[in-house]
């Protein structure tokens, strides 16, 4: 294992930071928070032009063929600016499912379009009990002739109101099965939910007698949870990278503020209480990065402890991002609570990311189970 990033990865990080600093200022983020669609075509197309949507797509399907570690580098920079839009749902959710379980025909039909920015996807897993495990998937998919009829509700589905395709986890007689659905399909409806973090749009997806053919299966019937387990390990690492970037940005903002904000005739950064807070935040950020980078390497290389590392990274980052944003608000004092300041945007993203793919408690339970096994 190499403990450092390569020269190419450092260049990728710098180019991503430069682009996002120019194209995704906080004014754009705030605008997209108020926009029902959640992203602008101009920024999306520029990102596609940089090849980001195809970063981990194999070269034979029009992508760059890079690894999850390379995606982590870009996602960390995206987390620093709280990038809105369907990048994560397309690349780190739906796209991964297609790469892991899709047939050759499905890959040829979807991945080139995804890599060019023309095709967007998402993944629908959660239902009313909000469980990120196999037992939580109960949406019905009954056989009907040569196809299936789907009925049920999915909740908190990222960007379902704007994507082209939704990969839906359902339960057939064989077990959990994945279906590739067109968003415009008859009987499929989406409703945008009002959530705390409006930088990431979440939807309710309803399926009422949705008829699909056998060609809609993504992978074999009954093998859906095996696919989801692999995809969720990668997605946890991807989200952890985003959280690391956001936590780093909050730390930088807090340190800078502590240098210039004066109280009792001196910068507040000279007070030991503030220094302790910033030091604790630094420890949290660096620990989160270490856990995430190792998990990215482990998952990319199919290491025996890949699932364990992914759960550990998600558990640590869930707590770290929330705690760092909370302490950042305390360092800023009263101004940190105002709508005009940007800290509340990071805090809300931290809270949303904390529960996605299971919170720290959920993932620590997974760690315990892996350790016992």
Image (cartoon, rainbow, N blue to C red):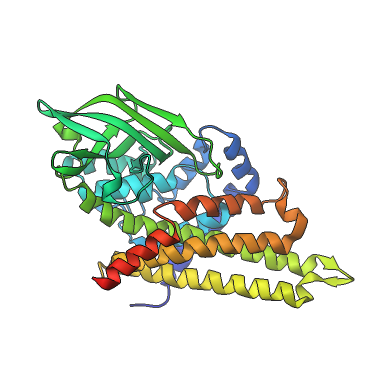
Residue found at x 52% / y 42%: 43
Task: Residue 123 in the image: state x and y as whole percent.
Answer: 34, 42
The answer to whether 267 appears left or right of 198 in the picture is: right
Residue 355: % across, % down: 46, 52
Displayed quadrant of residue 160: top left
Q: Quadrant of the C terminus?
A: bottom left
For this orientation, the residue located farthest to the right is: 265
The residue at 40%/45% (across/down) is: 89
Q: Do we see residue 360 in this rendering? A: yes
Taking the image as drawn, is residue 69 in sight? no
Taking the spot 72% from the left edge, 72% from the top edge, the residue there is 274
**Front one among 227 and 302:** 227
Question: What is the quadrant of the N terminus in the image?
Answer: bottom left
Tell me where residue 281 appears, x and y as whole percent.
60, 70
**Residue drawn at (33%, 43%) of the image:** 125
**10 to 338, vertically: above or below:** below
What x and y, as percent, mark residue 13?
49, 63
Q: Nearer the viewer, residue 251 or 274?
A: 274
């Amino acid at each position: 294992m190499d403990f450092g990033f390569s020269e190419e990865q450092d260049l990728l990080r710098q180019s991503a930071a430069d682009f996002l600093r120019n194209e995704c200022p906080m004014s754009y983020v705030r605008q997209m928070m108020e926009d029902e669609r959640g992203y602008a075509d101009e920024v999306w197309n520029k990102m596609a032009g940089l090849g980001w949507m195809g970063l981990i797509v194999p070269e034979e399907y029009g992508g760059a063929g890079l690894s999850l570690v390379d995606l982590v580098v870009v996602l960390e920079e995206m987390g620093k600016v709280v990038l809105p839009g369907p990048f994560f749902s397309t690349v780190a959710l739906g796209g991964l499912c297609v790469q892991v379980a899709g047939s050759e025909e499905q890959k040829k039909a979807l991945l080139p379009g995804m890599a060019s920015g023309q095709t967007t996807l998402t993944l629908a897993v959660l239902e009313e009990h909000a469980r990120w495990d196999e037992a939580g998937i109960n949406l019905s998919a009954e056989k009907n002739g040569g196809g299936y009829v789907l009925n049920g509700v999915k909740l908190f589905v990222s960007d379902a109101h704007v994507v082209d395709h939704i990969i839906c986890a359902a339960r057939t007689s064989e077990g959990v099965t994945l279906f590739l659905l067109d968003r415009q399909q008859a009987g499929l409806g989406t409703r945008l939910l009002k959530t705390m973090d409006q930088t990431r749009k979440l939807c309710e997806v309803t399926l009422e007698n949705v008829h699909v053919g056998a060609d809609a299966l993504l992978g074999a019937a009954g093998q859906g949870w095996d696919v989801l387990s692999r995809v969720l390990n990668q997605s946890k690492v991807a989200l952890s990278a985003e959280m690391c970037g956001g936590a780093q940005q909050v730390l930088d903002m807090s340190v800078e503020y502590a240098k210039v904000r004066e109280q009792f005739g001196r910068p507040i950064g000279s007070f030991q209480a503030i220094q302790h807070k910033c030091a604790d935040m630094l420890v949290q950020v660096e620990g989160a990065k270490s856990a995430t980078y190792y998990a990215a390497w482990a998952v990319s290389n199919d290491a025996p402890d890949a699932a364990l590392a992914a759960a550990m990274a998600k558990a640590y980052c869930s707590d770290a991002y929330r705690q760092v944003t909370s302490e950042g608000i305390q360092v800023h004092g009263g101004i940190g609570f105002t709508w005009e300041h940007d800290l509340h945007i990071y805090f809300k993203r931290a809270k949303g990311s904390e529960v996605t793919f299971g919170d720290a408690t959920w993932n620590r339970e997974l760690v315990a189970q892996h350790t016992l096994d």
